[in-house]
Image: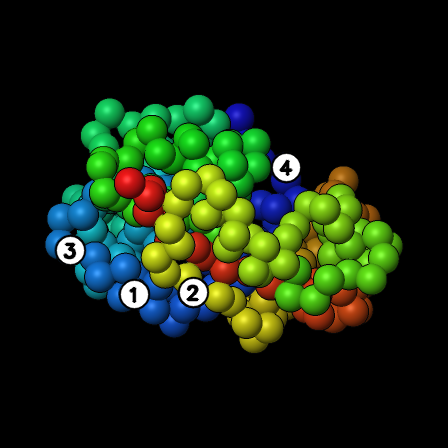
Amino acid sequence: MDIPRIFTITESAHRIHNPFTPEKLATLGAALRLKTGTRLLDLGSGSGEMLCTWARDYGVIGTGIDMSQLFTEQAKLRAEKLGVADRVKFIHGDAAGFVSDEKAGVAACLGATWIGGGVVGTIELLAQSLRPGGIILIGEPYWRLLPPTEDVARGCLAGSISDFLLLPELLASFGRLGYDVVEMVLADQDGWDRYEAAKWLTMRRWLEANPDDEFAKDVRAQLTAEPERYAAYTREYLGWGVFALMMRR
Ligand code: SAH
């Protein structure tokens, strides 16, 4: 079981697989006023940067589940490196339908809401692992500017304009599901650059190390096309943020 190989190639050097910088991730952790010992569940935990740094900085404990073998290995190494391996656990597996027995104070899914079939399904899934009064974290794109055409949406690698909402609409949609939005931290274009542009050097180095790989043609095509595509579309039109939700009573 694993994710498509292209991600493992392009994001092998990423610690954070989303447009957040380390500073934004720390800002989010501080904004949540986490108490030592808070249990965090992270579906699609990637290379584990949120769990590991929040365990180090805020004393959280918890579990991450991710379908990428490579990213899960990197997460375990990161936990060792930061000295928090006794507080965080990383499981390689499919997080779809995952409900934890030990209820979490914070249940998160950042940049992987397809795990629950979209934002609505992912909130429902996370809610099943949450203790009463807990916080759900959803990391999700929104339109910074509404694409004028479907072609522009596809340029952002969205299926269509309707895949994402404008920020006020996204916030309102959480309310309609019965949740208060109690915090949010938004990525900016510099953060998008760290996420997207970091892939280019990784791809270039991979191509030099793997010229005869069956994937080399695909990676070469991506490296050639990505900077312009990214600058014209994703960087202009797509926002990304993490939204903290608490169920209304
Ligand atoms: N939350 C992490 C990773 C986001 S990238 C971060 O923000 O850094 C999306 C992640 O979802 C990848 O690590 C990918 O391996 C993982 N993933 C994709 N499908 C999954 C599934 N069905 N179950 C668990 N993880 C999945």
Which of discs 4 and 2 lies nearer the camera? The answer is: 2
**Which image quadrant is residue 132 in?**
top left
**Marks 1 and 2, how far apart in space?**
9 Å
**Marks 4 and 1, how far apart in space?**
34 Å
- In the picture, the disc for residue 35 is 3
**Which image quadrant is residue 178 in?**
top left
Q: Read off the residue under disc 2.
A: 185
**Marks 4 and 2, how far apart in space?**
29 Å
CB within 8 Å, label 3 to label 2: no
Q: Secondary structure at mark 2?
A: strand
How is the model colour-coded? rainbow
Mark with earlier residue (3, 2): 3
**Marks 3 and 4, how far apart in space?**
37 Å
Position of 160 with respect to 119 (left or right) is: right
Screen quadrant of the C terminus: top left
Residue at screen point 53% across, 40% down: 119
From the top left corner, tell me how far across and down residue 130 is, in percent. 28, 36
